[in-house]
Image (cartoon, rainbow, N blue to C red):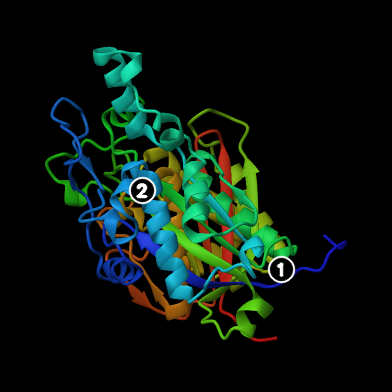
Amino acid sequence: MTDFERKRVVVTGLGAITPIGNTLTEYWEGLLSGRNGIGEVTLFDASKHDCKIAGEVKGFDPHEYMDRKEAKRMDRFAQFAVSASKQALADAQFVINELNAEQVGVIIGTGIGGLKVLEDQQTILLNRGPDRCSPFMIPMMIANMAAGLTAIHTGAKGPNSCSVTACAAGSNSIGDAFRLVQRGYAQAMICGGTEAAVTPLSFAGFASARALSTRNNDPAHASRPFDRDRDGFVMGEGTGILILEELEHALSRGAKIYAEIVGYGMTCDAYHMTSPVPGGEGAARAIQLCLKDAGLTPAQISYINAHGTSTPANDSNETKAIKTALGESAYQVAISSTKSMTGHLLGGSGGIEAVATVMAVANDQVPPTINLENPDPECDLDYVPNQSRAQNVDVALSNSFGFGGHNVTLAFKKYVGS
């Protein structure tokens, strides 16, 4: 990477709609207090399902961000993305206008897209016939529409795309947006991940794959990453959005800077459709590539926001990957899985977890891993159990891994002027 000037890229705005809060402030306060966002499913009748719990977004009103007609023509995953993007732009005090619109882009990833619309329209097709299906079904369903509608609602005319890399989609989107700003293809990017897959078909599919927790009688303790008694992940929903901005542009307008994004590593296991490669070799390489991209050493890492899904396969393999990538430094790093509080947002997880990672850097606070009561002997690192921790967070990583073998690591550090 010597044939272009690497521009420095900073985070100037954040937005979040999550199972533990529908604003950045609510979300961050919820993380630090160890708030549980898991409860009984209310979005559909889950009585016949093996898993009856989820991390649902509560009290979300899309009409705070758009009119009723617009909201009606969006699936929930797109409503989340548009709303959180408007939050992030407001937080950054970034105004998109005719002068800068072509230099502002959008990349928002999702794992599944408009599954609820697809399910509803399939029911209409079977019960009422093809002529009764909505003309908005396709644009409401397709995965890229979160990014497309965000551009429409904000006026961003620059690069626009959507990563669909399962549970790594949000992090891939942030990493790809970072590259565009770093290489001068955009001055700013709206980026992150979104998902709204708490639906009957999604639950049936994941349950058939034996991926979901069935701790239905104790939802508050169902998501328990790195714990010996974990029995699967808990589905969550929501979105996390970052405004990435070229440093000089941010400084020229006096922007608040949360952190600098400095590294992006991605790999593939090339091993199995759903299972990580034993030992976490692919994840370890993603971490190592991220460190190399950022010019960081393992000893410089203060905190890792782990993928930490609360599944037997992920948590032990991620632990091994961190040890491989960081060596002895792995035992000195604070690590936590915020999925213990929010559940697993699939394609949205990388978005809200990048927001959490940036906030950790900005505030020198590490969120906890709640429900870590009986540590798995194979998971023997410092997972910040049950209580948040005040400590210096100079450099932090965020890990995301997805079905298909996708592995992504992002690196953020405290902004220091040139």
Q: Is residue 288 above or below residue 195?
A: below
Q: Quadrant of residue 235?
A: top left
The answer to whether residue 378 is visible is no
The residue at 42%/79% (across/down) is: 363
Dot 2 lies on which element? helix
Rendered image: mark on residue 252: none
Alpha-carbon neighbours of circle 2 within 10 Å: few (<14), some, or many (≥20)? some
Give 240 or 307, whichever is nearer the viewer: 240
Amino acid at dot 1: Gly
- The quarter in which the N terminus is drawn is bottom right
Q: Position of residue 291 (x, y in %)?
A: 66, 62
Residue underneath mark 2: 70
- Residue occupying the point 38% across, 39% down: 312
The residues bearing labels 1 and 2 have C-alpha atoms spaced at a distance of 45 Å
Q: Which quarter of the picture shows residue 101?
A: bottom right
Depicted 210 relative to depicted 89: above or below: above
**Residue 330, x across and y down, in percent:** 53, 62
> Does residue 222 appear in the picture of this structure?
yes
At a point 68% along the width and 63% down the height, the residue shown is 186
Is the Cβ of the residue at disc 1 closer than 8 Å to that at disc 2? Answer: no
In this view, which residue lies farthest toward the right?
A: 3
Circle 1 or circle 2, nearest the eye: 2
Report the front residue among 298 and 190: 190
Relative horizontal placement of residue 159, taking residue 48 as reference (left or right)? right
Q: Earlier in the sequence, mark 1 or mark 2?
A: 2
Which residue is identified by label 1? 295
For residue 5, which quarter of the picture? bottom right
Q: Secondary structure at mark 1?
A: loop
**Residue nearest the viewer, comparing 322 with 132:** 132
Question: Residue 218 appears at what percent x and percent y?
Answer: 14, 46
Binning the other alpha carbons within 10 Å of mark 1 as few (below 14), some (14 to 19) or many (20 upward) gives few
